[in-house]
Amino acid sequence: MTPPSTARHVAPAAPQIVLEQFLPYRLNVLATVVSNALAQIYAERFDLTIPGWRIVATLGQYGVRTARDIATHAVMHKSTVSRAVSALEGRGLVVRRPNRDDRREEWLELTPEGRRIYDALAPEALAFEDGLVSVLSPAEQKAFLALVHKLEGRARALAPNPLAEAAS
Amino acid sequence: MTPPSTARHVAPAAPQIVLEQFLPYRLNVLATVVSNALAQIYAERFDLTIPGWRIVATLGQYGVRTARDIATHAVMHKSTVSRAVSALEGRGLVVRRPNRDDRREEWLELTPEGRRIYDALAPEALAFEDGLVSVLSPAEQKAFLALVHKLEGRARALAPNPLAEAAS
DNA sequence: GCATATTAGTTGCACGAGCAACGAATTCTG
DNA sequence: CAGAATTCGTTGCTCGTGCAACTAATATGC
């Protein structure tokens, strides 16, 4: 587990990046672990993928949105959203309605069945979040969310990726 | 862009999850945007994948590690690390050395060429991080990192995923 | 000491997801 | 008003990545 003392190449005395403190690395690790833990709820018990879960959650909150709205909001590729919507539609959880004012896009909304799943899922997701942030004081929780928002705005400005260009 | 006023189904008056404040969602969005922005550096200019970049960064800091160490530390699947190591080895950036005390595992380290890439990459990655956190005060930066660590520890405890079980 | 269980790493398989090209609809421009 | 450019969404292609089964090596237990 420890490198041999006879190693000809040793770690530099002053590593240029300390991963334990390198924010992009830490954010990815944290997001991955949190995501995996949360997936236990929506994947195993409701058979939803990450994109599927995000679509259900977005429509659950907003009622009616377009695929583009969801993609922009959640920083997902439009093809990812397209396929996930098709899957949800096939399962009878989402319906499309044409927008007569702009027939390129479609309004998406949950079916009663989709709403039922959302209603069952939401309290559990919130309970999970509560359990997660319970290691922080209320003040810390509030501060953390504010800092996340600040960083997200900054990161979207730095990202040349079209996925990140539009605001939420 | 706004749902029609004649919609038969409207958003509930009190949505159960507010995605703008739902931490797992916000963390994933933030990590994705940051990751995409950082990838501009290591992907386009050094042709590294995310796993490849993580392996180079880990070996750059620690000198010698096993594939398992890297996978655990970065919450990556061992097959992901295995293939990324093979690719880096093929490009002459990483070498393997057998561990005579336990011949199941192998020590990994950067070649001089791999070290050159790390040395070129590290300052740019740190500059990117500086640009990212520049929207926070030094005190906020420190506080944010501490809260990330707290949450990561908690999330790893909540995650039943074997990838997240071991500590860093 | 030998059978069993565990661990490090690899690989076949399948699937999720990004890219790019496309069709359809709308908007911009001169 | 006509042609060019843009936008929404879909789909073929490719590839990264997780899962599970496997080999080889080591640790455990009777």
Image: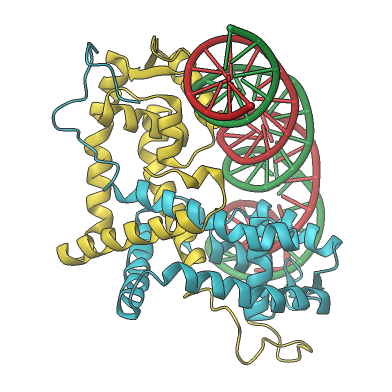
Chain colours: A cyan, B yellow, C green, D red
* C17 lies left or right of A120: left
Identify the residue at horizontal 39%, vertical 9% (top origin). Answer: B100
**A3 or A46: nearer the eye?**
A3
Q: Is residue A167 visible?
A: no
Task: Find residue B114 and report its horizontal and vertical position in percent.
Answer: 32, 19
Identify the residue at horizontal 81%, vertical 76% (top origin). Answer: A111
Task: Find residue A6 and report its horizontal and vertical position in percent.
Answer: 22, 11
Identify the residue at horizontal 17%, vertical 26% (top origin). Answer: A12
Total numbered badges shown on the rendered structure: 0
In the figure, A72 relative to C9: above or below? below
**C27 or B135: nearer the eye?**
B135
In the figure, B156 relative to B43: above or below? below
* D3 lies left or right of B74: right
* A115 lies left or right of A60: right
Q: Quadrant of residue A82?
A: bottom right
Q: Is residue A79 visible?
A: yes
Q: Quadrant of residue A134?
A: bottom left
In the figure, C5 relative to D24: above or below? below
